[in-house]
Amino acid sequence: MADFLANPLLNEFFAWVLKTSLLASVMAGLILMIKMALNHRLKPGWHYMLWLLLLLRLIIPAGPQTAYSIYNLLPWVGTASQDALHPAVHTGKDNQAVSYPAEEPEGIQTPVSTTQDAGPIVEEGWNAKKVAIGVWLIVAVIMLLRLPLVNAVFSIRLRRYAVTATPADMSLLQQAQRVMRIRRRVRLSYSPIVSTPTLFGWVRPRLIMPLNIQELDDKQKHHIYMHELAHMKHADIAVNWLMHLLLAVHWYNPVLWYALYKMREDQELAADAAALRNIDPAGIAAYGHTIITLLERSRLRGMIPGAAGVSGSKQQLKRRILMITTFKHRSFRWTLAGLVLVLALSGCALTNGKTPSDSNSSAPSETTPAQEVTPGTPGDNGAVQNPKDTQNGSGSETSSTGGGSSSPGKSTGEKPSTSSGGSATRGHEQQIKDIYALAKKGQVKGANFVSGKTIIDDVHKAWGDPDRPWQPTDSYAYDSYSPGAGRGTYAFGIGRGEVVYDIRYFGSQIDESTAFNQISFTEIQKTLGKPGSIKTSGSDDILMYKVGDYELKFVGPHSTKRLDHISVYSPRAAAPMGEAKR
């Protein structure tokens, strides 16, 4: 069970549910403030439409980022702590947080620390997060299974105790259908199990009337039919089903339960308004009297997802009567105001806020496929300073090969070259292109080694002993270095024949030209085009691009959609599954 709850897809879905629930709660509060400010000035149909936007907020996986989103005022909304999602975070010599490896060959994940004495860290057993996911999942499944069960029991009881309607009643219903312009067949029957008129069923709608309704006159029955047919015209049964399904997933959120209660109120008012628009103004008072009569006889019943009808508490009665007595036919001014309000709410509440880095970085004018990118000259990618020399103060440097082979250990004393375009880039476009250009050679910035060709002994000769060598208990062998001097952290995967088949680079927070945590996945895809594949490993997302003989992987937390490290991987040199260096 614990292994199932640790499933990356389940964890990702749970994180999305929590984030969406929080965003919807903020939106529900905004809707309540709008309703309180406008009150009866806004038509009932527009009140109801605001709640439909809330349902949409709960459905859409993500909205576009805009500067007009209300969530720009709440930067903490929808942001999860990266530390909570990653099992181990360590500090390298540059005082930067490092967590690696985040992905392994063939999808195997093996967390490795950067300390000399730390072994692999594997998250096993139960923890608070798994318990939370387990409780949420159990209750959600129970509630989801309960919905069709309650609906089925109600349907069975209706069929068992149904009383056929008279031809006169059927004639009245058909007349109301013509007025409401509804052509679908609606069955009509009486039943003692309902206390108020109820429309039940979406595919085959059925109008069920309580037995004591037979004493009402034809005009009152006509009013009732009009109200129920308004529910049908608005597809309220489908809306109720959707609302209950979403509540089953977000069962823990009291704000959404209260929003459901208020939405059902506005649903009834919208049905009243739709019926009144098709009634002669002289009959409005009689319609109000009919509604009062029905609500006085009604008794509270549990909410059934497949039903809609004349319902409401005694506390709602005053609001409904006020709406009916002050009802006016369509006003173009307020109709336009309602439309503007709905569009404005959609723009600010169905969108996601922008982060500072999103605002500061501008995208290229067009998206270019990865295979067609022509990166600029890589900047500062050739010189590799020996960490041992740095510590001894010698300052000797290793020159770049500039091609496919490496010559680690040779010192030339030359200063690193700088890209002519690297200092004048838009956003992180040039930095991403530099990464791509080096990956085509099997290299990463600041390391004069080639994935799939360099022997690990060459790395040891050039950089000395690793800060964290691979351990016999590791599933895959990685030697890790933090050379210092603001150069960041590296990890070298060791395959057959001691060949380095994977070079991972985590950048450096000290040097802005190598800092990765401000580069968003969106910028990467805008610069390099759509990746060959997008994978998930633990709590990380991996964008993979085929770059010549290599695979260039951009790895970062799913919660932030920002880069943590890159991997230049050589499929030809990779060890087969389970064949780690021993």
Image (tube, grey):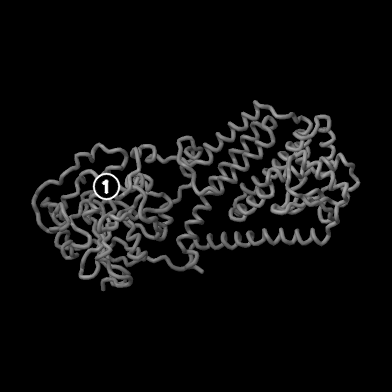
Residue type at tag 1? Thr
Quarter of the image for residue 140 reads: bottom right
The residue sitting at the top extreme is 333
The answer to whether residue 312 shows anywhere in this view is no
- Coordinates of residue 50 in the picture (x, y in percent): 62, 39
**What residue do we see at 32% from left, 59% from top?**
100
- In front of the other: 18 or 282: 282
The residue sitting at the left extreme is 412
- In front of the other: 357 or 337: 337
- Coordinates of residue 283 in the picture (x, y in percent): 83, 33
The residue sitting at the right extreme is 215
- Coordinates of residue 185 in the picture (x, y in percent): 75, 49
- In front of the other: 528 or 493: 528
| Residue at disc 1, secondary structure | loop
Within 10 Å of disc 1 (Cα), the crowding (few <14, some 14-19, many 20+) is many
**What residue do we see at 75% from left, 31% from top?**
327
Left or right position of 77 against 29? left
Relative to 203, is 368 above or below?
A: above
Q: Which residue is mark 1?
A: 514
Q: Quadrant of the C terminus?
A: bottom left
Relative to 117, is 515 above or below?
A: above
Left or right position of 221 against 537? right
Left or right position of 411 against 143? left
- Coordinates of residue 543 in the picture (x, y in percent): 36, 54
The answer to whether residue 536 shows anywhere in this view is yes
**What residue do we see at 80% from left, 41% from top?**
176
